[in-house]
Image (spheres, coloured by chain):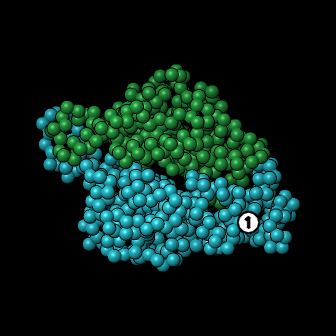
Chain colours: A cyan, B green
Amino acid sequence: MSLATKSFEIFCGTGGVGKTTLATARALNLSQQGLRVLLITIDPAKRLKDILGLTSESVGEVTEVSLQGTKLDALLMSPEKTILRMAAQNKSPDLASNRIVQILSRPYGGMNEILSLIELQLRFESQRYDVIVLDTPPGAHFLDFLEGIGKIRSFFDQSFVEIFSYLGQKTAKAGKKVLGLGLINRIVSGGVKKLLGYLQSVTGAEFIDDFVEAVQIIYQSKDVFLKGLALQDRLKSRTQCNWFLVTSVEQGKAQEAIDLKGHASHFIHQDHFLVLNKCLEQELTEWFPGDPKLIKVKASLEGKERHLKGRLRDAFPTVLEFPEIISLSPVEHIQYLTQKWKTYAT
Amino acid sequence: MSALPRRLYIFTGKGGVGKTTLSKAFVRELSQKGHDAVYLTFRNQALGADHQGNFETSKSGIREVFLDLEECARGYIEKRLNTKLVSSWIVKTPFFRAIINMVPGFSYLIYLGKILEMGKDNPKLIVVLDAPASGHALTMVEATSNFRQIFNTGIISEDTTKMLSRLNDPEYTKMHVISLPSMMSWQEAIELRSGLTERTPVSVDITVNNCLFQLLEGHMDELPVGLKDKALNEKKLVEDNQSQMQCVLPHSLGLDSASVERDLVGSLSNLI
């Protein structure tokens, strides 16, 4: 098994499986190897923030954290902060002050996935890290994350160049605030004009003004959005990225993990690992209950776990098992998992 | 206690806590009580090649509806513009697709609109929504008010205002956060519940699913260490937080989700 160090390590999975905890342990494991590590996580549980000593002020900013003597940088995604950085980098303050962009970049405005791609690329470009570990949002939404690249591309697709560049010229000439219905009516692009016309009949003119302005501002910042595209090839490259699909015995969802892999097949290369958390098997095989009820419980737990492992081993080249840990404190828990990663990093 | 069920039940929680199985079992239980209940979930999060249409089946003995984003968007536009032709064209335009796909909250708005419309068309219908997990549930709950602010005026803004009045009506909507009986899952459920209650006035209850300890009660000393720890931790968690748990469900010995689902039927009346 090869668990070589790459520039990126992506953790994805079904949620509630300890994905963030495992990603954190992996980041610590890499850091202990002497690497400069950044851990990016979206919407982590408060518990993890507490373990890492992250406060609400650190949201959206890279913060050095330390766990039992091991240091690493961590970033809790904040769409708002990412937008501010994009605006600064692109010298387009309008991006951060547009009303629609502001509403959508609220913590749960839904832009987390796409913006985390851009953040990932910006951090990579900073060349400050040997490895960036990304903990993606749970479940099928990890696909949103992957598809984010395609979405950004289609948003700036050639078919819009006409309307956007027209709008761009218009603003360059007229200054910012002249946009409005008059402008819409003059847009040459027939399809878009018609569409906006229909839209106006249900949204009112005011929205169209705001909307056109938002689209235009986003378009002016397109270079920084399109940076996300450069990431695609890196994530697809076996030499640059490790993929970890995480699931847990508790969930018993082999099919979901296999489906995730299937949907992501055009991204995920040979170096992908199925991480199976919360395994009970080792303990169960050494248990010989006498009570008939307990025999049933054992058979149920063991049967479910074996069935799951069988299916996963058929579908994935490598399955990394992590045991269920109950009795340890959260910090000890992470330490234990970090040790376990060490045994896999041959 | 209100005897009448709500019209919309939203089941959320981290992935893998049993949302799908539980919401299907809940529909089964409601149906057995004589209610016109339907299990509902979203087929896709983006507009594109996988357009499959809305899909309904009752093969498993309950009504299951799978909503398709493109079909729901098209239906709404058709209703508002009064033309099927134009609505089909709009949802196919790359421009419309790109916008919807860049902004996931928009898809939730479209789906929720469709659910409320189904509820209006059939005043007896009870929708049990197998909703997106955690953070995405917050995005979904926030979407309607975010878009009302974005649109500000016009028909869509009026429609979102009407949507909010129903979604935020405690007599209409109820939410269930599902958790596993582990400290980590429980804390996340508590966080999710407070995130939800910040965004909606409807009641949000937590159900703890898949508890082993009830099965093992009386046999604690016959268990291997890890399993015993697990059971004792579960028990302590439940005892310490019982007042905040709407429902505590035992682990099912069923080996597949269909038998687990059937096992649950009959123990879910607390969720109504």
| Left or right of B20, for residue A93 | right
Residue A185 at x, y percent in the picture:
85, 60
Which amino acid, by three-letter code, is at mark 1?
Answer: Gln
Residue pictured at 37% horizontal, 36% vertical: B241
Badge count:
1
Q: Report the front residue among A4 and B49.
A: A4
Residue pictured at 60% horizontal, 60% vertical: A80
Residue pictured at 15% horizontal, 45% vertical: A287
In the depicted structure, whether residue A30 falls above or below residue B178:
below
Q: Secondary structure at mark 1?
A: helix
Q: Report the front residue among B126 and A56.
A: A56
Residue B123 at x, y percent in the picture:
63, 27
Q: Report the front residue among A197 and B1.
A: B1
In the depicted structure, whether residue B179 falls above or below residue A99:
above
Could you tell me which chain the residue with mark 1 belongs to?
A
| Left or right of B57, for residue A176 | right
Can see residue A113? no
Residue beneath disc 1 = A216
Q: Give the class, few, some or many, for how many residues have Cα within 10 Å of label 1's Cα (few <14, many ≥20).
A: many
Can see residue B249? yes
In the depicted structure, whether residue A227 falls above or below residue B44:
below
Instruction: Give the residue at the far bottom of this rendering.
Output: A127
